[in-house]
């Protein structure tokens, strides 16, 4: 199949906005890379056909002493909320790269085919439609695969949680009130400090040891209404936050190791460690009533988490194998050996370290 290139410019009907809308049709995964963003994404999403889309990633900046400090959190919340409203079951991820200057749009289809745009146009109405911007549409697969690897490999903070972005928005609004006459170039709303404390820096090497962990938690993912099934082959390798129902899980602290398993199949999904103590979700979040608590976590098993169904290692199977070696050994930290008995309503169980 002959691969084509095409010049995109905002001086004709072949503008960036129309081309992006065209490429969204049928796309399974989309990556938007842009330092500047729509302040409000509502009009942008209204014009997109995302019926086949399962995952959208946005990579942008959050630089100190710039418009980013005051405008970017509100823009990111608009992006997330419009994503959830338009395609509620799709994965939505926001990543930060403060060295970013390029503007790139990548589309992946069910066949595995990639298509992309490399451009001067930011993800704004001016960039996509009004400004005199030029971009190149490409279909060369090897080139696009390299580009995707480089884009994702240069992320500074991966999968920043909505809850953290909400906190940033509040910081930015308060800073603007406190410094009404201050030039934007002199304002630092401390958003990077929040990122460094609460988000996962991709270049950090996380230490991991079952021996050193004070508490090791077994945590189910999913519930009776939305069980995790083998046939769905749902991927968990990029999961960096874990949610809990009421009451607040007081046992869970920063540094805990959390082993997750699927409720429907009881297969092991991932191994995390908690980066933060338990936080509360914003009251306006659609899942806040059912899952009001969360921790930011580092996933030590991303590759396994994206292919766990191929192995189907269940917690019950592990228990049987452990009891063959240690017939009288406990499974839970309090001495029990029933993997079906979780603390009522808490949705987690502290494990005996030997079993863990």
Image (cartoon, rainbow, N blue to C red):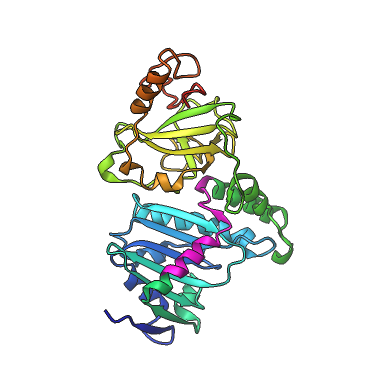
Left or right: 338 as drawn, with respect to 102:
left
**Residue nearest the viewer, comparing 60 with 256:** 256
Left or right: 7 as drawn, with respect to 156:
left
Figure check: 43 above or below 352:
below
Q: Does the magenta stretch include residue 146?
A: yes
Residue at 45% in and 38% down: 288
> Where residue 7 appears, x then y in whole percent?
41, 85
**Residue nearest the viewer, comparing 80 with 137:** 137
> From this viewpoint, is residue 103 visible?
yes
Quadrant where the image shows the N terminus: bottom left
> From this viewpoint, is residue 290 visible?
no
Left or right: 142 as drawn, with respect to 276:
left
**Residue nearest the viewer, comparing 211 with 80:** 211
> Where residue 53 appears, x then y in whole percent?
32, 59
Residue at 38% in and 48% down: 306
> Where residue 215 appears, x then y in whole percent?
55, 26
> Where residue 310 appears, x then y in whole percent?
31, 43
Figure check: 109 above or below 263:
below
Q: What stretch is highlighted in magenta?
A: 145-163
> In the picture, residue 15 is in which quadrant?
bottom left
Residue at 37% in and 19% down: 324
Residue at 50% in and 18% down: 333
Q: Is residue 72 magenta?
A: no
Work out which residue is located at the far bottom of the displayed protein and give it. Answer: 11
> In the picture, residue 261 is in which quadrant?
top left
């Amino acid at each position: 199949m002959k691969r084509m290139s095409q010049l995109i410019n905002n001086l004709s009907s072949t503008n960036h906005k129309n081309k992006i809308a065209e490429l969204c049709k049928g796309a399974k995964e989309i990556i938007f890379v842009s330092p500047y963003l729509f302040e409000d994404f509502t009009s942008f999403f209204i014009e997109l056909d995302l019926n086949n889309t399962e995952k959208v990633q946005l990579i942008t900046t959050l630089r100190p002493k710039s418009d980013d400090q005051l405008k970017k959190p509100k823009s990111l919340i608009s992006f997330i909320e419009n994503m959830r409203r338009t395609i509620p079951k799709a994965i939505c991820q926001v990543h930060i790269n403060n060295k970013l200057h390029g503007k790139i749009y990548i589309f992946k289809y069910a066949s595995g085919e990639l298509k992309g745009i490399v451009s001067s146009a930011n993800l704004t109405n001016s960039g996509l439609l009004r400004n005199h911007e030029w971009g190149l549409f490409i279909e060369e697969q090897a080139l696009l695969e390299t580009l995707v690897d480089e884009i994702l490999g240069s992320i500074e903070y991966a999968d920043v949680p909505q809850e953290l972005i909400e906190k940033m928005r509040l910081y930015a609004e308060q800073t603007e009130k406190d410094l009404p006459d201050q030039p934007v170039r002199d304002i630092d709303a401390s958003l990077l400090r929040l990122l460094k404390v609460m988000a996962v820096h991709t270049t950090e090497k996380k230490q991991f040891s079952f021996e050193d962990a004070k508490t090791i938690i077994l945590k189910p993912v999913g519930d009776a209404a939305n069980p995790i099934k083998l046939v769905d082959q749902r991927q968990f390798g990029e999961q960096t936050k874990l949610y809990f129902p009421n009451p607040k899980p007081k046992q869970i602290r920063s540094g805990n190791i959390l082993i997750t398993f699927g409720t429907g199949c009881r297969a092991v999904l991932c191994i995390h460690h908690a980066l933060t103590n338990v936080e509360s979700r914003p009251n306006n979040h659609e899942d806040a009533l059912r899952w009001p608590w969360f921790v930011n976590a580092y996933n030590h098993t991303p590759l396994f988490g994206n292919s766990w169904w191929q192995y189907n290692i269940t917690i019950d199977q592990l228990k049987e194998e452990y009891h063959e070696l240690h017939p009288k050994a406990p499974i839970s930290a309090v001495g029990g050996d029933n993997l079906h008995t979780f603390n009522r309503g808490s949705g987690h169980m502290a494990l005996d370290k030997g079993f863990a």
